[in-house]
Each structure stands twice: as C-alpha cells, then as structure tokens.
Image: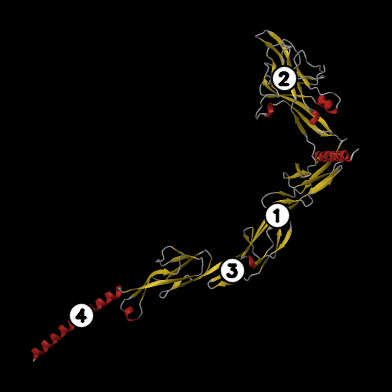
C-alpha cells in the first residue's frame, strides 16, 4: 500500500471518528418524525388506468362512480425511509398519521398491512399492486368528519424494517371490508399537497425512541439547592440539551465507548436580588454514572455611601447567604466644609430603614441595600438694621427656611423720630431662591447654598411732615393769641390812667 493511499485512509478514518464522536455526544431524542418518500393509491374502478402517485389526495375505502356506474375500492400505499433513525436505538412506538380532507358518510375502519414487494408510485395501479402481508398490522377508525388526523400503530412493521428482519416496502391501507358501497371512502392529503403553514396536514411517521442497552450507557443527572419550579439549563459537550429541576433525575444516553462533558448553568436567576450558584458545574462521563450538581444561594448586596470617602464598605455584588461584611464610618459627626456649609452624619439605612445603632458588621441574609449618609447643611443668616429679624440657623440642603421681621415699621432716632419720622420695611435682599414675594414680612427661601438675607428699610417722612405742619399751626395760633392778649392788657392799663 502506497503512502498516499495510507494517508488518505487515515484521514478518512479520522474524519469518520470525529463525526461519530459528534453524533454520540448528543442525547438520545425521545421522538422523531419521518415524512414519506413515496405515496400512491390504487383504485379497482380503473384497474389498469389509474396512476395516482402525483396526486395531492390519497383515497381509501369503497366508492361508486355515478357517471360510469362503476363500483370499486381504493387502497393507499405509503413508504418511509427508516434508515435516518440513529443506530443503537429501540423503536418504542411508531405511529402513522394521515390528515382526513374528505370524510366518509359513516365511520369506517381501515387496516394497515405490511407490503412485501417493491412498487413505484409513478406507475403503480390496481393491476400492478405489490403483494402484502394478509394479516393486518393495525386498524383505525376514520370518523365521518373532515379536518382530523387518523392514526395507525405500525410499531411491529417499523421494528422489522429497522432491525433488518424485513424489507422496507412500506404499508398498504385498505378498508376492513371491501364491498359495494356509496360514500364509504376517505380522502387524505398526500406528500404532494402544498400544506403551507399547516404542518399537521402532512402525512408522517412519528417514532418514539429508546436507547438500546447493548449499544448505549446513561448518566443520571440531578441538581440540588434550587427551589421548586426553578430550572437549570443543561448542556452536553457545549450544546444545549434540556434542563434540570431540583429533585428530579434526568437520564442522558450516549453510545458506548464515548466520553462526554455534561454541564449546567453556573448561575440561575431567582427573585429580584436572588440567584443560585454552582461552582462545580461540569462533569465528564464515559460510562454509566450519577452526578449531583449542587447550587448555593447568593444575595445581591448594594452598598451606597455619601460622601464615599467618609465610609469604608465592601463593593456592591453577590454574596453567599450568611456572609458577614464589615462596614465603617471614617468621618466625624460634624464636618465643616466651608463658611456657612457643613456635613452632619445622618445615619445608616438598611433597606431604607434607619438603624438605631451604628453597625460594624452586616450579615447578608437576603437582598440588602445598605446606605451610609451625611447630610449637607447651609447656614442662613437673617439680618436687619432695624426691628428684630428671626430665622437664622442651619438648614438641610434643599429644604425651605422661613424668616420674618418683628414689625413693618419702627420710629426713627433723635428729634426726627420724636417728630414722627419712621423706618418702614421695604423688602428682603440677598438671594435668588425666594419663595413668594420678597416684600412680605414673612418670607422663605430654598437652601441651596449658605445664604445672607438682609431686611431693606426706607425712611417714611409722611408723619413727620404732618406733625411739623401741625406744630407750625399751633405756634401760629399761639402767637396770635399772645398778641391779642398783649393788646388787651395795654388797652386796659390806658383806660385806668
């Protein structure tokens, strides 16, 4: 043997071995559907003319041709290629299914018989029918109803074909009693019928398969740690292969002499903030074995601090149930940030609830959110050159601070004040964040920064002018009165002399 031939053989053997390995790595299918490679029907009314291998309807039963006054019976022939069934399998059940398009007037019983000789769907007619097994394989009742599937169990025939005990020449379907009858036949869709989206109309052979112990082994897989109803995806040699649920054993079948890797999901999602983790999520099998994939529960712990540099917490992430984590506050209770601005420790909040004591450790026994907070406070300084202004103090950032002045007006100082001059409140000044009109005695402001609020006053001369005018009038009246009195006195003195 030349080197080239030897190399070619080795290459071919390697390719075949690889193909076999790939095929063996898959789990055994529990079911398989085959579609016919040939179908036809023969009609005794037209024994040497009828060739129906290309028609879209297959007829079986007893019927009458009114136009030609001919009585007769129809038989269906149909064949499937079972060589597509993987080796090393057992046929648990084989069901032939046809979709009834035309229904008989009354229920009919149709039998299947194994065909013993070859036949050609393009040339077969009643006169050229192949021989078939006289003993029926199965029977089924076809109802007087359209749009239904009629099925026959032909497991024994398919097993014989698969094992090689009988030639696969297909199945013949006939009415239980062939006789003169009217409207006693059914019409079924053939493989040539354009089913479009109606896959249920296609003739088919539905197989249920089981592994053959002589050629296969199985590995039993199970998972623990998952709650009821939660599934973990399973893979075989990297390809998806079903799923596993807690406490339920799943058998995975392989061809003998092959080695495979079975895996499950590393993580399985649960409710919000909950997941399940499998650290050892792969196993290798080459013979019958059992394996349990163990899951443990993890919770999402979210850590949030403000400001972040004043706390020490672990990173946000997933933690095993019962994990103890350390937390710490590094800042003082009060921290001056700038003039008029400070930070005040507000507390620790676990799942939005303020803790009564400051923690050093937290147990992750469920999904948690831990927050360490400082609040920012700003100083409001309320001043007024007159009257009594109130409202100065520290306020939380974003809050509303209220302030007021004790009166709308005050007397001026000195002589003018004695004469009625007043100082009247005009407005508040010092901020762009006033709520309401700044001319009101009682004001408020949003504390977005440290703020200086000053009451602005203006001089009020109205009373002073009035009072001065009155004073002048009084003085004038008094002057007149004094003058008159003086004149009267002088007149009185002159008369006496």
Find the distance from the CA under tag 1 to the CA under tag 2. 65 Å
Residue 52 screen position, x and y as percent = 71, 18
- Disc 4 target residue: 476
At a point 78% along the width and 19% down the height, the residue shown is 119
Residue 66 bears which disc, if any?
none
Q: Is residue 441 above or below residue 204?
A: below
Among the two numbered marks 3 and 1 on one chain, the one whose residue lies closer to the N terminus: 1
Q: Is residue 99 above or below residue 16?
A: above
- Disc 1 target residue: 299
Near-viewer residue (289 or 84): 84
Find the distance from the CA under tag 3 to the CA under tag 2. 92 Å
Residue 211 screen position, x and y as percent = 83, 35
- Disc 3 target residue: 344
Among the two numbered marks 4 and 2 on one chain, the one whose residue lies closer to the N terminus: 2
User: Mark 3 near mark 2, Cβ–Cβ under 8 Å?
Assistant: no
Among the two numbered marks 4 and 3 on one chain, the one whose residue lies closer to the N terminus: 3
Q: How dense is the environment of label 4, judged by Cα within 10 Å: few (below 14), some, or many (20 and up)? A: few
At a point 30% along the width and 73% down the height, the residue shown is 462
Among the two numbered marks 1 and 2 on one chain, the one whose residue lies closer to the N terminus: 2
- Disc 2 target residue: 53
Label 3 or label 2, whichever lies nearer to me, is: 2
Residue 425 location, quadrant:
bottom left
Q: Secondary structure at mark 3?
A: strand
Image check: 2 left or right of 264?
Answer: right
Find the distance from the CA under tag 4 to the CA under tag 2. 141 Å
Find the distance from the CA under tag 4 to the CA under tag 1. 97 Å
Find the distance from the CA under tag 3 to the CA under tag 1. 31 Å
Among the two numbered marks 4 and 1 on one chain, the one whose residue lies closer to the N terminus: 1
């Amino acid at each position: 043997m030349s080197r080239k031939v030897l190399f070619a053989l080795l290459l071919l053997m390697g390719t075949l071995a690889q193909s076999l390995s790939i095929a063996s790595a898959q789990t055994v299918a529990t079911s398989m559907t085959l579609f016919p490679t040939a179908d036809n029907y023969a009609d005794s009314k037209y024994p040497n003319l009828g060739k129906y291998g290309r028609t879209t309807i297959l007829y079986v039963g007893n019927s009458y041709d009114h136009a030609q006054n001919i009585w007769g019976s129809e038989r269906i022939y149909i064949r499937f290629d079972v060589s597509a069934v993987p080796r090393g399998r057992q046929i648990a059940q084989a069901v032939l299914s046809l979709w009834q398009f035309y229904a008989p007037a009354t229920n009919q019983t149709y039998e299947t018989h194994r065909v013993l000789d070859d036949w050609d769907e393009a040339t077969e007619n009643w006169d050229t029918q192949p021989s078939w097994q006289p003993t029926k394989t199965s029977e089924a009742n076809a109802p007087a109803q359209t749009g239904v599937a009629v099925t026959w169990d032909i497991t024994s025939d398919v097993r014989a074909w698969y094992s090689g005990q009988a030639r696969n020449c297909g199945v013949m379907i006939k009415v239980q009693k062939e006789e003169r009858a009217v409207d006693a036949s059914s019409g079924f869709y053939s493989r040539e019928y354009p089913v479009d989206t109606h896959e249920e109309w296609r003739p088919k052979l539905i197989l249920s398969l089981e592994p053959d112990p002589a050629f296969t082994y199985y590995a039993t897989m199970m998972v623990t740690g998952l709650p009821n109803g939660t599934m973990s995806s399973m893979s075989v040699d990297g390809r998806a292969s079903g799923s596993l649920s807690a406490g339920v054993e799943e058998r995975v079948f392989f061809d003998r002499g092959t080695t495979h890797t079975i895996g499950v999901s590393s993580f399985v999602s649960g409710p919000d903030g909950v997941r399940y983790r499998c650290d050892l999520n792969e196993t290798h099998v080459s013979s019958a074995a059992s394996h349990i994939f163990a899951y443990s529960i993890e919770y999402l712990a979210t850590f949030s601090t403000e400001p972040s540099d004043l706390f020490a917490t672990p990173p946000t992430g997933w933690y095993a149930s019962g994990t103890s984590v350390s937390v710490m506050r590094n800042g003082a209770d009060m921290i001056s940030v700038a003039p008029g601005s400070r930070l005040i420790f507000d507390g620790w909040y676990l799942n939005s609830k303020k803790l009564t004591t400051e923690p050093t450790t937290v147990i992750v026994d469920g999904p948690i959110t831990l927050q360490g907070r400082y609040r920012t406070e700003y100083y409001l300084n309320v001043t007024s050159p007159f009257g009594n202004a109130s409202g100065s103090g520290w306020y939380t950032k974003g809050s509303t601070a209220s302030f007021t002045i004790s009166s709308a007006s005050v007397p001026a100082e000195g002589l003018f004040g004695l004469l009625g001059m007043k100082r009247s409140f005009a407005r508040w000044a010092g901020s762009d964040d006033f709520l309401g009109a700044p001319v009101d005695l009682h004001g408020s402001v949003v504390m977005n920064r440290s703020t200086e609020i000053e009451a602005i006053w203006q001089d009020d001369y109205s009373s002073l002018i009035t009072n001065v005018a009155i004073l002048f009038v009084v003085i004038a009246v008094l002057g007149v009165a004094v003058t008159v009195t003086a004149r009267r006195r002088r007149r009185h003195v002159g008369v006496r002399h």
